[in-house]
Image: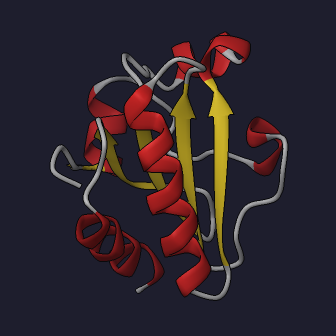
């Protein structure tokens, strides 16, 4: 994920919560990790990001991919300081943000970020 950041440090620096719950997402967290994608209806890179995250989550047992419509979840978008779509958050099994990136990620970068989250 080219624009990846250390999730805990970024969250603390920007006053964002370090953890996201299944209730926040409207679904359960993955047993090992969760890939959260913020998208909008007319976002071209969001479609490619959806395919990449779905493929990667399908490769690793216990990993969920959750896509959030940013326009329909403005409170969560504001709380997490999502400024553009797609924005991808990688959560560990407890819902802690371990990586964050804006823009379309590369598959290899998603795999690497996921590896760090499940380690």
Q: Quadrant of the C terminus?
A: bottom left
Residue positioned 53% across, 13% down in the render: 78
For residue 29, which quarter of the picture?
bottom right
For residue 94, which quarter of the picture?
bottom right
Q: Answer left or right for 45 relative to 74.
A: left
Residue positioned 43% across, 22% down in the render: 82
The one of 117 and 54 positioned closer to us in this rendering: 54
The total of numbered circles placed on residues is 0
The one of 45 and 114 positioned closer to us in this rendering: 45
Q: How is the image coloured?
A: secondary structure
The one of 46 and 26 positioned closer to us in this rendering: 46
Q: Position of residue 52 (x, y in %)?
A: 44, 61
Q: Quadrant of the N terminus?
A: bottom left
Q: Position of residue 3 (x, y in %)?
A: 18, 43
Residue lying furthest left in this view? 2
In this view, 83 is above or below 39: above
Q: Position of residue 6 (x, y in %)?
A: 24, 52
Residue positioned 32% across, 24% down in the render: 14
For residue 10, which quarter of the picture?
top left
Residue positioned 52% across, 71% down in the render: 55
In this view, 23 is above or below 39: below
In this view, 77 is above or below 98: above
Q: Answer left or right for 8 relative to 29.
A: left
Q: Position of residue 91 (x, y in %)?
A: 52, 59
């Amino acid at each position: 994920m080219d624009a990846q950041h250390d999730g805990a440090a970024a969250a603390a620096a920007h006053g964002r919560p370090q953890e996201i719950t299944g209730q926040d997402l409207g679904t359960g967290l993955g047993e090992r990790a969760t890939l959260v994608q913020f998208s909008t209806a007319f976002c071209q890179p969001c479609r490619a990001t959806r395919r990449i995250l779905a493929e990667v989550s399908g490769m690793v047992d216990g990993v969920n991919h959750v896509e959030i419509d940013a326009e329909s979840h403005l409170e969560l978008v504001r709380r997490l300081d999502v400024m553009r779509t797609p924005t991808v958050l990688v959560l560990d099994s407890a819902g802690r943000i371990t990586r964050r990136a804006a823009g379309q990620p590369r598959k290899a970068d998603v795999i690497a970020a996921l590896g760090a989250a499940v380690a």
